[in-house]
């Protein structure tokens, strides 16, 4: 696991230097794969996306951004969670496009886990609901993304966002309730 000093230094350098950006990837790759594996372990059987592929695809999206300006660990992991969300959402759209006439059911938020849903329409409903939540309460949406797409526990989200576990738990409770309404 990278030291805070290494991570901060590479974040600053990655903005200007492509080699530093690649070194940052090497430094956090194992941590990102670990998060993705946790997420994908709760996935339905037969899912075609693997944890390493999810991390690599998310990284390509991060690298494809015009800027690599990450001000903090929080910003970096937030961007990584968003990239993973986009990968999973795009994957769900592709699967849905291949399925014609699929019946759509309401998505239950009990034990919600995007990767575990076997219905791409559900994944798209969740993506739309998260976009609405983002407009209403960006912090709650960020907590939801870190919980759902990065697979972080409340304590890990608190560390990534540099806030208290109590605040994260409150934001997560709100996000779940609001997503339930939206879905």
Image (cartoon, rainbow, N blue to C red):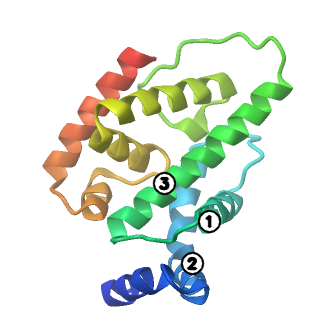
Measured as percent of width and height from the top left, residue 60 is found at 67, 65
Q: 117 or 93: which is nearer to us? A: 93
Tell me how far mark 2 sits from mark 3, CA to CA: 14 Å
Seen from the viewer's position, the closer of residues 9 and 38 is 9
Q: Is residue 112 left or right of residue 18?
A: left
Q: Is residue 119 visible?
A: no
Let me know if residue 52 appears in the view: yes
Q: Position of residue 138 (x, y in %)?
A: 31, 41
- Above or below residue 39? Residue 131 is above
Looking at marks 1 and 2 on the same chain, the residue that comes earlier in the sequence is marked by: 2
**Tag of residue 81:** 3
Other residues around mark 3 within 10 Å, as few (<14) / some (14–19) / many (≥20): many
Which residue sits at x=31%, y=32%?
175
In this figure, which residue is indicated by the disc labeled 2? 25
Residue bearing mark 1: 59
| Image quadrant in which you'd find residue 172 | top left
Residue 144, position in %: x, y? Answer: 37, 41
Q: CA distance from mark 1 to mark 3?
A: 10 Å
The reply to whether the C-beta atoms of the residues labelled 1 and 2 are less than 8 Å apart is: yes
For mark 1, does the 10 Å Cα neighbourhood hold few (<14), some (14 to 19), or many (20 or more) residues?
Answer: some
* Disc on the earlier residue, 1 or 3: 1
Residue 80 percent location from the top left of the image: 50, 60
- Secondary structure of residue under mark 2: helix
Quarter of the image with the N terminus is bottom left
The residue tagged with tag 3: helix, strand or loop?
A: helix
Q: Does 113 sit left or right of 140 as displayed?
A: right
Identity of the residue drawn at 18% across and 38% down: 170
Q: Residue at x 61, y 31 (%)?
A: 117
């Amino acid at each position: 696991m990278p030291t805070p000093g290494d991570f901060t230094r590479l974040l600053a350098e990655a903005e200007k230097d492509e080699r530093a950006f690649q070194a940052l990837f090497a430094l956090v790759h194992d941590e990102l794969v670990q998060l993705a594996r946790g997420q994908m372990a709760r996935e339905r059987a037969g899912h075609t996306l693997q944890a390493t592929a999810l991390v690599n695809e998310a990284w390509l999206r991060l690298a494809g951004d015009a800027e690599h300006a990450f001000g903090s660990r929080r910003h970096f992991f937030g961007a990584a969670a968003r990239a993973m969300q986009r990968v999973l959402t795009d994957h769900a759209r592709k699967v849905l496009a291949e399925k014609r006439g699929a019946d759509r059911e309401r998505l239950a938020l009990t034990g919600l886990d995007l990767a575990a849903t076997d219905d791409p329409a559900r994944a798209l409903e969740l993506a739309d609901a998260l976009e609405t939540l983002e407009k209403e309460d960006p912090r709650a949406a960020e907590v939801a993304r870190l919980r759902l797409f990065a697979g972080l526990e409340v304590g890990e989200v608190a560390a990534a966002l540099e806030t208290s576990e109590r605040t994260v738990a409150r934001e997560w409770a709100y996000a779940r309730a609001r997503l339930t309404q939206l879905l």
